[in-house]
Amino acid sequence: MKIISFDLDGTLLRDNKTVSDFSKNILLKCREAGKTLIFNSARPPRLIYEVLPEEFHGDIIISSNGALINKGEETMFKNFISPEDTRVIIEYLEGNHPKIYFSVEQGRDSYTSFYDEAYNKEMFALKVDFREVDLKGTPKFLVRVGAMTEEELERFIQTLPPSCAFLRTDGGEFAQIMARGNTKLSGIKKIVDMKNYHIDDVIAFGDDHNDFEIIRDCGVGVAMGNAETAIKEVADHVTLTNEEDGVAKFLFENVIGA
């Protein structure tokens, strides 16, 4: 295997959002052995770099579910929702669901018009008046769809611009809205193509619904012990939980020692 892809939350990160020294050392050994490391997350870049040890900031980062790919300071790929479609989604949510949290990634920040400042702080979002914001394209919306009825959710999905894709995550509590075609798997495929490798050359680790495709389609898909049942069902292997350094222990037993 030439490429190793890591989800972060619930996978590489422990529940306190840290990477253990053991995990860090195993990843460094993988890199020294010539493996390409990919950190593949729904998080925007700034929230990846906050939790990812500095030793890995120069590795490949796929953020916002495939909307943006960086290697160090280099942007390798980006595909954002247009400013016009971003405005359409904001106006629908504010007009129809003013009490439901949503945020919009804009540059280095996430913006929201949600009224609960404490919740916004927990979600790392800045409260703004969107009427006063000169919107740019956005890599991702995050919407708390668990607070919608099924009928409201269906209407919301139907009103999304055709350029957008809808993905429900976090046990159904949230949805992520991205430009159509952006997924964690699409990001991996772009890297594979750039390096003239094959998808079978990839080991992928994950735990949530947005990891389903990479666990199913990569050469070796490894589900965490704490993963959703659907992820475990398509995985080639199930390792220990994120709290037990399942990623590093699998690599130690199957890659470093291989």
Image: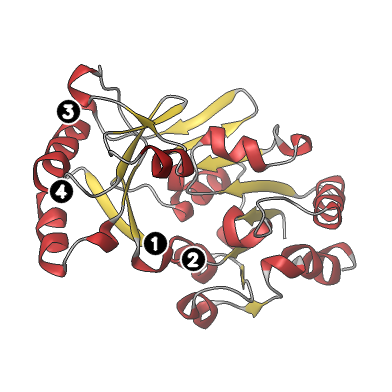
Q: Which mark is residue 97?
A: 4
Residue 218 falls in image quadrant: bottom right
Q: Secondary structure at mark 3?
A: helix
Judging by the rendered image, the residue that carries numbered circle 1 is 169
Q: Earlier in the sequence, mark 1 or mark 4?
A: 4
Left/right of residue 174 with respect to residue 109 in the rendered view? left
Q: CA distance from mark 1 to mark 4?
A: 19 Å
Q: Secondary structure at mark 4?
A: loop
Residue 96 image offset from top left, x and y in percent: 9, 47
Viewer-nearest residue: 61 or 199: 61
The answer to the question of whether label 1 and label 2 lie on touching residues, with beta carbons closer than 8 A, is yes
Closer to the observer: label 3 or label 1? 1
In the displayed structure, 242 sits above or below 106; it is: below
Left/right of residue 38 with respect to residue 20 in the rendered view? left
Q: Earlier in the sequence, mark 2 or mark 4?
A: 4
Q: CA distance from mark 2 to mark 3?
A: 30 Å
Q: Which residue type does callout 3 highlight?
A: Glu
Viewer-nearest residue: 235 or 43: 43
Judging by the rendered image, the residue that carries numbered circle 3 is 84
Q: How many C-alpha atoms fall within 10 Å of the one at disc 4: few (<14), some, or many (≥20)?
A: some
In the displayed structure, 39 sits above or below 49; it is: below
Closer to the observer: label 1 or label 4? 4
Judging by the rendered image, the residue that carries numbered circle 2 is 208
Q: How many C-alpha atoms fall within 10 Å of the one at disc 2: few (<14), some, or many (≥20)?
A: many
